[in-house]
Amino acid sequence: MNVVQRLSSRRALLLGSGVLVAGLLAAWSFSCRCKAPPASTVTAVERWVLDAERDPNCYYGSAWNDGDVMMPRASHDQPVRFVHVYTFEDDCTWRGVETLTPDGNGGYRYRYDDVLVSCAPNATPAPQCPLEGKVHIVSVTE
């Protein structure tokens, strides 16, 4: 190996080492310095389960249409109200009002009412479908 080849080999070795060190430094500087939030800041979640006999001939504009409702933990000592406005196949706009009243046992009494908002000309509104039941609370996280 002559002098030129030795110098080239050393330059390549130094350059390669420099690139490696620079890459490691860049990776370290961009790495996540994340850590889990303290337990006191994690929100406890509850699953609200509706127990009500739905009429299969009715549509309910309900928060429970897609299954149980996930909510942050609550004290369950105040009424809760969900309101949904939707257009139904009868060509009318309805307001579904769900009223939850504390039952004194950590759950709620449930009442659903439809309120007709408006209809297209010549539309025949579907019958209203009130619903009553109970909402049970299931803790998901502590």
Image (cartoon, rainbow, N blue to C red):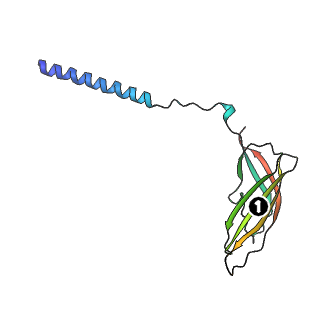
Residue 1 seen in this snapshot: no
Where residue 106 sits: x, y (%)? 84, 45
Q: Quadrant of the N terminus?
A: top left
Most distant residue in the left direction: 2
Q: Left of 88 or right of it: where is 79?
A: right
Residue 65 seen in this snapshot: yes
Q: Left of 139 or right of it: where is 25?
A: left
What residue is drawn where x is 67% and y is 79%? 121
Describe the element under mark 1 as helix, strand or loop: strand
Q: Quadrant of residue 2?
A: top left
- Label 1 environment density (alpha carbons within 10 Å; few <14, some 14–19, many ≥20): many
Q: Quadrant of residue 12?
A: top left
Q: Quadrant of residue 50?
A: bottom right
Residue 111's place in the image compared with 87, above or below, is above
Where residue 87 sits: x, y (%)? 66, 69
Q: Left of 76 or right of it: where is 25?
A: left
Residue 94's place in the image compared with 142, above or below, is below
What residue is drawn where x is 67% and y is 65%? 86
Q: Left of 72 or right of it: where is 19?
A: left
Residue corresponding to mark 1? 97
Most distant residue in the top direction: 3
Q: Quadrant of the C terminus?
A: top right
Instruction: Say which of 27 and 13 sits in front.
Output: 27
Residue 17's place in the image compared with 104, above or below, is above
Most distant residue in the bottom direction: 122
Where residue 129 sits: x, y (%)? 79, 69
Q: The disc labelled 1 sits on which kind of residue? A: Val
What residue is drawn where x is 38% and y is 27%? 24
